[in-house]
Image (tube, coloured by chain):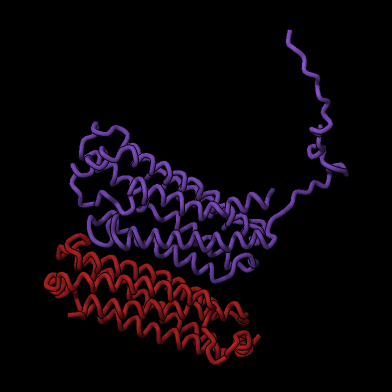
Chain colours: A red, B purple
Amino acid sequence: MAVTDILARLRAADQDPAVRLPGEVGIWIFILGDMAVFGLFFTVFVYERDDHPDLFEASRDTLNITLGTLNTLLLLTGSLFVVRGLNAVKDGRSRVARRWLAGAIVTGLAFAVDKVVEYADQAQAGHGISTNHFYMYFYMYTAIHLTHLAIGVCALIYMRGLAGRPELTVRHVRNLENGASYWHMVDLLWIVLFALLYLMG
Amino acid sequence: MNRRAQIIAAWCGPAICVIFSIGALGLARFIPPEISPTASAAHAQSIMIHGSGRIRVGLTFMLIGMSIMPAWGTVVAAQLRGSEGRFGVLSYIQIASIGVGSALACAGCVVWAAGAYRPGQLSPEFSRYAVDLGWHFFLWAWEPFSVWAIAMGMAILGSGNTVYPRWSAYVCFWTAFLFSAATGLTFLKEGVFAYNGLLTLWMVMSVFFVWIIVTSYLTIRNVQGGRFHTFHDPDAPAGPNPDDEVAVRSRDLPVAPLTNAG
C-alpha cells in the first residue's frame, strides 16, 4: 500500500481530518503525561531557586554554556532531520529517509557524548550531586532527560529500519509518527531544561 | 470459577491501594515519613521506640498490600497471555518481574518491622540504618516494576492484542519512565529526590497507584465482557456432575424421637 493511501486512511479514520493527530492517541497521552511531570520538575526548580537565588546563581555560573548551547543545537538539528526523514518516507524516497534518520541518530549520540564530557568536567571541579541543591537538580533532571534521549535513539534506529522497508503498513506509518513525536518531545524538554539550568539569571 | 478468580484478582488492585494506605498513612506513618533522611539517629530511635506498636501493625497492613500484588499482576498477564501465542515471553517477564518487585517491596516492610522489634534495645545508629535500608528496598529498587510495566505495555501493543486499548500501553510506559525518579534516593539526603521528597516518594507512589487503578478498571471490564473460560472436560461422562448432586435434603431427614439417654 502506498504511504499516501495509508495517510488517507488514517485521516478518514478520524472524525475531523483537519486535526489528525500524528501517530496515535496513546503516544499523546504519554507525551502530555511526561510533559506534565517535567512541568512539575520545572516548577519545583523555580520555586526553590527563589529561596536561594545567590546559591543557584553562583552554581549556574560554573556550568559550561558552550556545551549546553551545543547540545541545544544538536537536538534542534536532530528534530529537523527527523522531519525531513519522515517527509522523505511519505514521498516514497526510502534511501533519503534512511540517511536523514541516520543523521538524527548521530545528533542524539553526539548529545550523549557532550553530556558525558560535561558531567566529567563538573565532577573534576568537585561538583557532585549532593554538593548543593542546584547540582542535585542539574544532575537528576539532565540524567532523566538523558534516559529519555537513549530511548529516543533506540526509537530512531527502529524507525530507520522501518523506513528501509519496501512496503509500509498502517502500523508502520503510525509507529514512525509515534517515534518522531517522541523525539520532538525530547527536544522540547531539553530546550526548557537548557533555559532553566543554563540561562535563567 | 475462572471468572470469579479473575474478578477477585483484579479487585486486588484497588485493595492494594486501600490496605497499603491504611498501613502506611494511618498506622506506620511511613508516608509521609516521620523519620526524614536528615533526621538524627536519636530521633529515629525515639520514633521506633514510641511508635513500635502502631508501626508494626501498620507494616503488617503494608505487607499484606504488597503481598497481593502478584495476584493483581498475574490476572493482567493472564489476560494478555492469550494474545501472545505459544511462546508468551512477555507474559512470563511480567510474572517474574512481579515476583521480584513485590518481594523487594515486602523486604522493605520486613526490615522496618525488625527495626521496631526490640524497642529500646537497638542503638540509635542501627535504628536509623533499619529505616534507611527499608527505604532502599521499598523505593530505590524500582527497576523490576519498570520491567514489569514495559513488558505489559509491549504485550498490549503486540500485534494480536485486542484485550486492552492501545493507549493503556502508553500509560504503562509513562509509569515505567517515572519510576526512575526514585534513583536519586541513594545519592541524596534532602530535597525533592530524597526518600521523603516530592519527586521520589510522592510522585512515584502516585503514579504507581494511578497505574494500578486504570489497569484494574480495564481488567475488570475485560472479564465482565466475557474474557474468561468455563471449564469443560471432553472426556467427562455425560450427565450432571456427581459432586453437584444434593446428597440429602434436610426436609427428607427422618426426625428422630427424643429419648432420654440412659
Question: Residue at 51% of width from left, 81% of height from top?
Answer: A177
Question: Residue at 56% of width from left, 58% of height from top?
Answer: B90
B42 sits left or right of B138 in the view = left
Q: Quadrant of residue B186?
A: bottom left
B244 sits left or right of B183 in the view = right
The count of marks equals 0
Observer-nearest residue: B237 or A187?
A: B237
Observer-nearest residue: A131 or B78?
A: B78
The percent position of residue A140, horizontal first and vertical second, equals 28, 65
Q: Is residue A62 visible?
A: no
The percent position of residue B242, horizontal first and vertical second, equals 82, 37
Q: Quadrant of residue A39?
A: bottom left
Asked if B90 appears above or below B246 in the picture, the reply is below
Observer-nearest residue: A131 or A93?
A: A131
A44 sits left or right of B105 in the view = left
Question: Residue at 62% of width from left, 89% of height from top?
Answer: A8
Asked if A189 appears above or below A92 in the picture, the reply is above
Observer-nearest residue: A109 or A95?
A: A109
The percent position of residue A6, horizontal first and vertical second, equals 62, 86
Looking at this view, name the residue that lies furthest to the right: B238
Asked if B171 appears above or below A88 in the picture, the reply is above
Q: Which quarter of the rendered picture does the C terminus of chain B lie within?
A: top right
The percent position of residue B170, horizontal first and vertical second, equals 50, 69
Q: Is residue B101 visible?
A: yes
Asked if A158 appears above or below B139 in the picture, the reply is below
